[in-house]
Amino acid sequence: MKIPEELTCIECPLSCTLRLKETDGKIEVSGNQCRRGEEYGRKEALHPCRSLTTTVATGYAHCPRLPVRTAGEIPRELLFAALREIKKLVVREPVLTGQVLIKNLLGTGVDVIATGELNEQDI
């Protein structure tokens, strides 16, 4: 796997430009102004993960979409497969914010949760 030479750190507002180098199987990170940048650079080089936010269908014309997100990060290479899986869901009953809609998405151990509500009056 080829590691990127540079990354912009997103762990804090400083947005440091991280320089990555692989030496003897270890990732060296420079350019960071805090420890979080060093950790982020290594993680992003070895196993990039992302949170996923999207919407699902509700089946109701007056409230056709419900916002959802993953409850944690999933491997970046699974994003499109995750979107295909989430697209299969159609919500047809009341939902509370934070309610799990899909458990263990694609075997990642990460659930898909509602970030909005669908109340009785919406149905």
Image: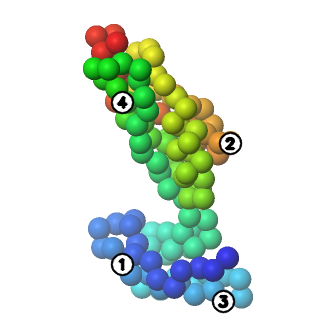
* In the image, farthest residue toward the top: 120
Q: Residues within 10 Å of mark 1 (few under 14, many from 20)?
A: some
Amino acid on which the number 4 mark rests in the picture:
Arg
Q: Is residue 21 left or right of residue 71?
A: right
Amino acid on which the number 3 mark rests in the picture:
Thr
The alpha-carbon separation of the residues under discs 3 and 2 comes to 33 Å
Q: Which residue is mark 1?
A: 16
Q: Residues within 10 Å of mark 4 (few under 14, many from 20)?
A: some
Residue 52 seen in this snapshot: yes
Position of residue 72 relative to residue 36, above or below, is above
The alpha-carbon separation of the residues under discs 3 and 1 comes to 21 Å
Q: Nearer the viewer, residue 30 or 74?
A: 74
Regarding mark 4 in the picture, which secondary structure is present there? Answer: strand
Q: Which residue is mark 4?
A: 65
The alpha-carbon separation of the residues under discs 2 and 1 comes to 33 Å
Q: Which residue is mark 2?
A: 107
Q: Are marks 4 and 1 in contact (CB under 8 Å)?
A: no
Q: Is residue 72 left or right of residue 53?
A: right
Task: List x then y, in percent, for residue 51.
Answer: 47, 51
Q: Quadrant of the N terminus?
A: bottom right
* In the image, farthest residue toward the right: 24
Amino acid on which the number 2 mark rests in the picture:
Gly
Mark 3 and mark 2 lie on one chain; the one further toward the N terminus is 3
The alpha-carbon separation of the residues under discs 3 and 4 comes to 48 Å
Q: Nearer the viewer, mark 2 or mark 1?
A: 2
Q: How is the image coloured?
A: rainbow
Q: Nearer the viewer, mark 2 or mark 4?
A: 4
Q: Which residue is mark 3?
A: 23
